[in-house]
Image (tube, helix red, strand yellow):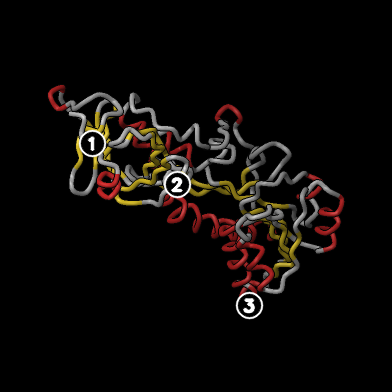
């Protein structure tokens, strides 16, 4: 099949490589690659670099709504459009150009968790399952008919990085290959999303990632997992000399307090500083911190283990 790939960064690159690897066995041909233009100083797009290294036509339009973008896609004579991690809006006048239309990857079980941070939110909300959807893009955000879905567990201690890189990333690449084969062969089905089950969440940014220690320890722990490695769950702390610090917590463990007598301190207090970690009280338990990064006086430090951080900033238990 003749594929027009629309995407960016490492996921787009992996999808590109997967289709290219099937050229001999399936006759797949990538006829063109569309990715958004990089902003000044932005990290080079991994998909663009891989496509150029493979000698493929690369198109970087500021808008896929433009006549130029649509003319470029039309000239490729593609059988199918494949959208792999696309943040640009792709109108129907663009996605309907290939002979068999376009398919799109979304890392949640649509119609749940529509929106741009659909991996973070299920973890933050304590879900035990997530997955991915391959669907037909429409002008509504993540609202098109579903072609296939794949499910995976969110284990109790898994982080955002583990769920994505170990599960949703490789599963998504294979699901796009599977869906492409079904669509071009005319063997797929399209199921309308149940709007009564739909949910939408916006970007998971700094304010959403702020830790509120007075919340139940399960919620605090889920938030930290959902932000590891990005955007990073954070709180404000004071060093030994009273300097204000913005501290981002990465690796940690959860400890639930079972009895009243086991409660130490109040939410937000540092209640223990040990040889490998320090612990902060939350409602109903404690978070044992293992790895952090701090911003002190506007200067961002590197990620360090908790003991190094505690020693450098003179952390002491409040109780």
C-alpha gap between disc 2 and disc 3 = 49 Å
Front residue of this view, candidates 209 and 8: 209
* Residue 315 position in % (x across, y down): 25, 39
Q: Quadrant of residue 15?
A: bottom right
- Asked whether 93 or 43 is in front, the reply is 43
**From this viewpoint, is residue 226 visible?**
no
Which label's residue is closer to the chain start, 3 or 1? 3
Q: Which residue is mark 1?
A: 255
Q: Identify which residue is drawn at 41% across, 49% down.
A: 301
Q: Earlier in the sequence, mark 2 or mark 3?
A: 3
Residue neighbourhood size for the residue with mark 3, other residues' Cα within 10 Å, grouped as few (<14), some (14–19), many (≥20): few
In the rendered structure, find residue 24 and report the number of the disc placed on it: 3
The answer to whether 169 appears left or right of 100 in the picture is left
Task: Identify the residue at horizontal 63%, vertical 71% (top origin).
Answer: 20
Q: Secondary structure at mark 1?
A: strand
Q: Earlier in the sequence, mark 2 or mark 1?
A: 1
Point out residue 34 in the picture as x, y percentages from the top left corner: 72, 58
Q: Quadrant of residue 180?
A: bottom right
C-alpha distance separating marks 3 and 1: 53 Å
Q: Which type of secondary structure does the marked residue at label 3 adopt?
A: helix
Q: Secondary structure at mark 2?
A: strand
Q: For residue 93, which numbered disc appears in the image? A: none
> With 132 as the anchor, is 70 left or right in this view?
right
Query: Which residue is pictured at 61% across the width and 75% down the height?
Result: 25
Discs 3, 1 touching: Cβ within 8 Å: no
Q: Position of residue 305 (x, y in %)?
A: 30, 51
- The residue carrying mark 2 is 300
Which mark's residue is nearer the viewer, 3 or 1?
A: 1
Name the spot of residue 277 as percent of width and height, x first: 24, 45
Which residue is the extreme one toward the bottom?
24
């Amino acid at each position: 099949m003749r594929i027009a790939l629309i995407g960016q960064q490492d996921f787009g690159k992996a999808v590109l490589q997967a289709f290219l690897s099937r050229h001999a066995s399936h006759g797949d041909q990538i006829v063109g690659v569309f990715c958004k233009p990089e902003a000044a100083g932005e990290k080079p797009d991994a998909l663009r670099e891989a496509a150029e290294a493979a000698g493929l036509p690369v198109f970087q339009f500021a808008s896929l709504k433009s006549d130029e973008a649509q003319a470029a896609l039309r000239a490729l004579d593609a059988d199918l459009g494949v959208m792999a991690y696309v943040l640009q809006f792709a109108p129907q006048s663009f996605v309907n150009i290939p002979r068999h239309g376009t398919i799109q990857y979304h890392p949640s079980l649509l119609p749940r968790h529509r929106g741009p941070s659909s991996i973070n939110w299920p973890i933050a909300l304590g879900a035990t399952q997530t997955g991915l959807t391959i669907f037909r893009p429409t002008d509504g955000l993540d609202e098109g008919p579903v072609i296939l879905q794949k499910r995976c567990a969110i284990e109790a201690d898994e982080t955002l990085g583990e769920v994505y890189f170990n599960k949703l990333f490789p599963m998504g690449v294979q699901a796009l290959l599977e869906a492409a084969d079904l669509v071009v062969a005319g063997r797929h089905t399209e199921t309308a999303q149940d709007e009564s089950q739909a949910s939408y969440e916006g970007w998971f940014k700094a304010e959403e990632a702020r830790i509120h220690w007075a919340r139940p320890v399960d919620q605090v722990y889920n938030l930290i997992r959902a932000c590891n490695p990005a955007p990073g769950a954070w709180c404000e702390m004071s060093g030994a000399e009273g300097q204000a610090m913005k501290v981002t917590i990465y690796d940690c463990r959860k400890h639930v307090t079972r009895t009243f007598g086991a409660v130490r301190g109040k939410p937000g207090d540092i209640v223990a500083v040990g040889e490998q970690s320090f612990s902060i009280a939350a409602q109903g338990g404690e978070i044992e911190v293992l790895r952090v990064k701090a911003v002190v006086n506007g200067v961002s430090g590197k990620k360090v283990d908790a003991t190094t951080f505690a020693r450098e900033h003179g952390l002491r238990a409040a109780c």
